[in-house]
Image: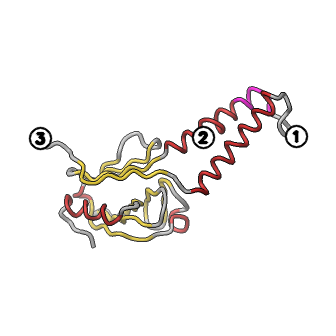
Amino acid sequence: MNASYSIFTEVQRFRQWWVWLLVLFVTGIAWYGAVQQIVLKKPFGNNPAPDPVMIMIWIIFGVLFPIFFYSLKLATDVRNDGLYVRFFPLQFHSHKISYEEIKTYEIRTYSALKEYGGYGIRYGKNGKAYNISGNRGVQFEFLDGKRLLIGTQKPEELIQALDTVSGKGSN
């Protein structure tokens, strides 16, 4: 039995300043409201939530939300036995794509917002997409006609690894 070994690995995270500005804004409001109401005993807002609800809001949006966002990552792994993609922590296990399923693949530039409605695991007019930043990726077309775009900061290296193990060659 042959052991699986990796040819190419890429792990991407949300590092755009505007994404983190939004996360920190939401987190900051949760912390400010909690400190105002729980610590300083000043009701937060015109219609303040009860203290237990405010504590829950603080835990969810002030603590868990930024931790969750920080932990988000897109892992792409080209192995000798298939292509593996995982969007952690939304997917607990990698999704394996067999090379036999792939009809074609090529590097392409795309618009995450226009074509897929943003970043993450998305669906759009060109099929499914796994993307986390940027506008370059590898577009796959499968034998069943479905399409998948995997966003990458290293499209040439990904294509080279796929060419090496799949035996198909990019278009």
Give the amino acid type for the residue marked by disc 2 in the picture. Phe
Q: CA distance from mark 1 to mark 3?
A: 67 Å
**Left or right placement of residue 8 versus residue 131 in this view:** left
At x 88%, y 40%, the residue is 46
N-terminal-most mark, 1 or 2: 1
Task: Residue lying at the far right in this picture: please name it.
Answer: 46
Give the amino acid type for the residue marked by disc 3 in the picture. Met
Residue 112 included in the magenta stretch of the image: no
Q: For the residue carrying disc 3, how many other residues have a C-alpha within 10 Å: few (<14), some (14-19), or many (20+)?
A: few
Q: Is residue 72 above or below residue 110?
A: above
Res. 165 image quadrant: bottom left
N-terminal-most mark, 1 or 3: 3
Front: mark 2 or 3: 2
Q: Give the labeled residue for mark 2.
A: 65
Q: Give the labeled residue for mark 3.
A: 1
Q: For the residue carrying disc 2, how many other residues have a C-alpha within 10 Å: few (<14), some (14-19), or many (20+)?
A: some
Q: Give the labeled residue for mark 1.
A: 46
Q: Are marks 1 and 2 in contact (CB under 8 Å)?
A: no
